[in-house]
Image (cartoon, grey):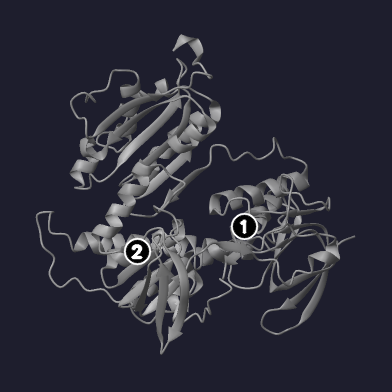
Amino acid sequence: MADFEVGVIGGGPSGFAAAMRLWDQGRRVCLIERGRLGGTGVHNGALSSKTMWELSRDYRNACRRDRGYTSERVEVRYEAVCEAVRLATGAKVAHMTRQLRELATPLPDRPGSITHLRGIARFLDAHTLHIEDADSGEVRRVTCDHVIIATGSKPRLPTNIEVDGRTIMTSDHIESLQHFPRSLVILGAGVVGCEYATIFANFGQTKVYLIDRADRILPFEDTDVSRLCSNNLERKGVTIHHKATLVEMRNIGGEVEYTIEHSGGGRETIRVEKALISIGREPNTAGLDLGAAGIVLGPQGQIEVDDTRTKIDHIYAAGDVTLDIALVSIGEIEGRHAAERICGIAGKSLAYDNLSTIMFLDPEVAAIGINEQEAQKRRVGYRVAVYGYTLVNRAIAMRATDGFVKLLVSDDDEMRILGMRALGVHASTTIEAVSLMMQSGRSARELAELLHPHPAVTEGLQDCVRMLMGSSIYKPEVFRSDLRLSRVSYADAPAKNGA
């Protein structure tokens, strides 16, 4: 008999969620983590960066002068901000540690157990793991009937730049800074790069430069979304190098000198105090000796899976290590699904069509389903309504009217929701009802007469639907700069029901 029914390698969001679902089903589980529980979902990533974003937004609001009061001597210290972040992440780790401690011993009515081992794991064969204790170096071998690999990812490093973690950094090093840098260049204008540009711009202590190879940031989003976020960054003093190619970046005397080439061919050299590299992430597979288990990596170093299962029937993988979608929520769902497949209770295969996301920018951006540029790329006919936050009572009350809600529905009488984008305060709260309706294939019409609390930002979503039905309270014919109502159709894809 094996030592454990399931071995889970990695104590981040995917691995922890998998272990808990296995415990639900009464399995004997070994959870192996080489570092801190929580992984990037807690440290140097999701929770830590979002905590820093919230703190930066609080600071910026405290400095505002348009709310009927003026705060005197609003001060901020980087070490104090980082301590607040550590308190937040520490609370999460404490929750996880407490649960693992409580579930280590089987209960009379619950035969499951989770043994938490802190160490570095590698495969000896497809069923045997070699685990070296992270502190003492003591070695232990354990056998497992099944294995779930959930080792996450790490920042991708450029081949031509020396990242020392002090002057030229990745997101793993942000909290090790001793003070707000006077100036900072960020290489990469994806979601993570733009989030950190927002954070440092909000605190107002750092001159930020952002190197963007594309002609606009967030190129995967519609132009109106990208433009608003870009304009807000630039209004805060961020310099965005659009359509720029990095030629060279190097450490000179403890500072960073970088040279970019503009689209017209001209080159520019700028010196700043620090640099942040944000060019994506890569799977954490080094040292696992996956070959000993018969697993061959994919072209980008990822573990290839079919609905979380690898080509080795009893070995599964979940989360960032598969390079599916690098989100905490997706990692948790994949970890749970892998556990359920092992236990034989999984339902239908995982689907990512109605994926919802939040980007912590200025303003906050919540997204689900497809946007206009994706619909046009697929030649999908649609109707779209855009409702500006300037007409949303809750946003008006908060003096935060920068943003809008955009809703795409099918170009027919059913008005099925294809996607939504919400930019502004409380944007994420508008997503949940839409996600449920998309999952069940229900018509957007049902949102028109829901009894929302007042005032709430969700009222903007409700009037988006009413605009599509021709019954909104505020009319696009009057508020032309705040409201938009459009239809895109294709001659070779006629709308259903004669619409």
Q: Residues within 10 Å of mark 2 (few under 14, many from 20)?
A: many
Instruction: Give the residue pinned by disc 1.
Output: 320
Horizontal and vertical percent position of residue 193: 43, 62
Please name the residue shown 15% across and 73% down the image: 73
Instruction: Give the residue pinned by disc 2.
Output: 199
Please name the residue shown 20% across and 62% down the image: 62
Vertical placement of residue 107 versus 365, above or below: below
Horizontal and vertical percent position of residue 233: 30, 58
Taking depth in this image into account, of 256 and 399 the one nearest to the observer is 256
* Mark carried by residue 417: none
Residue 361, by quadrant, is bottom left
Vertical placement of residue 34 versus 6, above or below: below
| 201 displayed left or right of 11 | left
Taking depth in this image into account, of 372 and 35 the one nearest to the observer is 372
Of the residues under marks 2 and 1, which one precedes in the sequence? 2
| 122 displayed left or right of 328 | right
How many numbered marks are there?
2
Residue 373, by quadrant, is top left
Name the amino acid, label 2: Ile
Look at the image and tell me in which quarter the N terminus lies. bottom right
Name the amino acid, label 1: Asp
